Image (cartoon, rainbow, N blue to C red):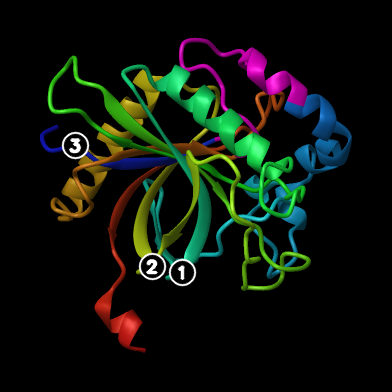
């Protein structure tokens, strides 16, 4: 499919996994060990038991961006994400996706573990978002922006995110989606890797084209992310997104 230069996969909220194998990367072990007791119950939650205003089941009781679903069919879902969502991010330059994500994840993990101006421990959230800006040629280095969502203020019911403390690492920064965006979302299960992500994005693009939406989405970036711990074996939830600008009529209202 031509012009497939942007997609967003929302796939891994607790820690990244290797794109070359179905087993978790070793860098995840220390984080999972420290967090396992707090998260174990959420990994087994029945998605049919959600409260009406609760986050989607695939957030596993972690804070994740609130959105509005405007359309859903068997192939994809259309969501509105509001303006002003905040993230903590870092940029890694390299050719290999898995190595870049591992490096970026650990920078952000150190931030939420206290490498910030308040020495504060900040709760883990969903998803981990990885935005890829491709190089100009097949052997050029890519820029990977790895991001953690900034948690909400309070119990997760609030729509106001915390005022995040400044990072002490100069390579980590607070990021914001000032204008909001539309996401065309394809969900799929199981373990994933780089090849599978690209294949899922191509399928999403074909589905959109078949519905007359040939030109949606920013075609200059790839974004990968996710909702599941690598220790989650069943009911894994991955997503691929194409992004489009927030509708002007919604902004005016």
Q: Nearer the viewer, mark 2 or mark 3?
A: 2
Residue that mark 1 sits on:
84
Check residue 178 in the rendering and tell me which mark sits there, or answer none.
2
Closest to the observer, 106 or 33:
106
Label 1 SS: loop
Mark with earlier residue (3, 1): 3
- Which quadrant of the figure has residue 134? top left
Q: Nearer the viewer, mark 3 or mark 1?
A: 1
In the picture, measured across the screen, residue 87 lies left or right of residue 134, that is right
Mark 2: few, some, or many residues within 10 Å (few <14, many ≥20)?
few
Find the magenta span and give its range.
Answer: 12-30
**Circles 2 and 1: CB atoms closer than 8 Å:** yes
Quarter of the view holding residue 138: top left
Q: CA distance from mark 2 to mark 3?
A: 25 Å
Please give the residue where the numbered disc 3 appears in the rendered image. 4
Name the image quarter holding the N terminus. Answer: top left
Q: Main secondary structure of the magenta part?
A: loop
Q: Which mark is residue 125?
A: none
x, y percent for residue 97: 39, 22
- Which class describes the residues within 10 Å of circle 1: few (<14), some (14-19), or many (20+)? some
- Please tell me which residue is depicted at 78% across the width and 66% down the height of the picture: 155
Judging depth in this view, the residue of 64 and 202 nearest the camera is: 64
Q: Residue at x 23, y 49 (%)?
A: 208
Which residue shows up at 44% across the image and 60% down it?
176
Would you place residue 53 above or below residue 115 in this image?
Answer: below
Numbered disc 3: secondary structure: loop
Name the side, left or right, on which 56 lies relative to 74: right
Residue 10 is covered by the magenta coloring? no
């Amino acid at each position: 499919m031509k012009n497939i230069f942007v997609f967003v996969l929302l796939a891994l909220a607790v820690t990244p996994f290797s794109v070359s194998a179905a087993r978790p990367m070793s860098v995840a072990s220390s984080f999972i060990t420290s967090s396992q007791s707090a998260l174990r119950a959420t990994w087994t939650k029945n998605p049919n038991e959600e409260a009406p205003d609760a986050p989607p089941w695939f957030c596993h009781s972690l804070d994740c961006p609130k959105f509005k679903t405007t359309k859903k069919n068997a192939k994809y879902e259309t969501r509105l994400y509001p303006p002003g969502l905040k993230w903590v991010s870092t940029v890694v330059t390299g050719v290999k996706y898995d190595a870049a994500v591992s490096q970026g994840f650990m920078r952000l993990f150190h931030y939420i573990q206290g490498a910030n101006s308040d020495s504060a421990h900040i709760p883990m959230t969903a998803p981990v978002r990885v935005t890829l800006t491709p190089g100009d040629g097949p052997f050029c280095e890519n820029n990977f922006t790895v991001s953690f969502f900034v948690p909400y203020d309070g119990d997760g019911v609030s729509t106001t995110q915390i005022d995040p403390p400044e990072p002490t690492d100069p390579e980590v920064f607070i990021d914001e989606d000032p204008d909001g965006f539309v996401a065309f979302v394809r969900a799929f299960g199981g373990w994933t890797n780089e090849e599978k992500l690209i294949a899922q994005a191509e399928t999403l693009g074909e589905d959109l084209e078949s519905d007359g939406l040939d030109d949606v989405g920013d075609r200059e970036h790839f974004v990968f992310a996710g909702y599941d711990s690598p220790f989650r074996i069943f009911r894994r939830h991955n997503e691929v997104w194409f992004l489009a600008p927030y509708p002007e009529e919604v902004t005016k209202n």
